[in-house]
Image: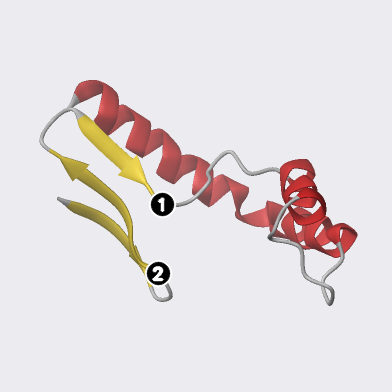
């Protein structure tokens, strides 16, 4: 069952039966994690230094309340079926 989509990547969350729930994004992402990924992996980009990646994630902090509500609702569905 499709649960969420995105304009760029298509399927973002789905459920298969009652036991398998999946997301294709990282709800656990913090500014520190994003900076580490940008610094230490193939995700680095010469025009976007790790500090800028961190700043962009920190700037998105205002969206946390709406994300929190989404993730709490998702967790409730997973736990209660």
Numbered disc 1: secondary structure: loop
> In the image, what residue occupies the spot 57% across and 46% down?
65
Residue identifier under label 1? 24
Q: Nearer the viewer, residue 29 or 46?
A: 46
Q: Dividing the picture into quarters, in which one does residue 4 lie? A: bottom left
Contact, CB < 8 Å: mark 2 with mark 1?
Answer: yes
What is the distance, in whole Å, between disc 2 and disc 1 at their CAs? 9 Å
Against 30, is 25 above or below? below
Q: Dot 2: few (<14), some (14–19), or many (≥20) neighbours within 10 Å?
A: few
Mark closer to the chain start, 2 or 1: 2
Q: Is residue 46 left or right of residue 44?
A: right
Residue 39 percent across, percent down from the top left: 82, 53
Q: Is residue 60 above or below residue 19?
A: below
Q: Is residue 79 left or right of residue 48?
A: left
Q: Nearer the viewer, residue 41 or 47?
A: 41
Find residue 56 and name its label: none
The residue under label 2 is 9
The quarter of the image holding the C terminus is top left
Q: Residue shown at 79%/61% (left/top)?
A: 53
Q: Position of residue 57 (x, y in %)?
A: 73, 56
């Amino acid at each position: 069952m499709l649960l969420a989509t995105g304009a760029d990547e298509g399927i973002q969350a789905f459920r298969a039966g009652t036991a398998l729930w999946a997301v294709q994004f990282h709800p656990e992402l913090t500014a520190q994690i994003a900076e580490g990924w940008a610094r230490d992996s193939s995700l680095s980009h010469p025009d976007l230094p790790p500090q800028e990646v961190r700043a962009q994630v920190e700037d998105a902090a205002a969206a946390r309340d709406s994300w929190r509500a989404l993730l709490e609702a998702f967790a409730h569905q997973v736990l209660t079926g």
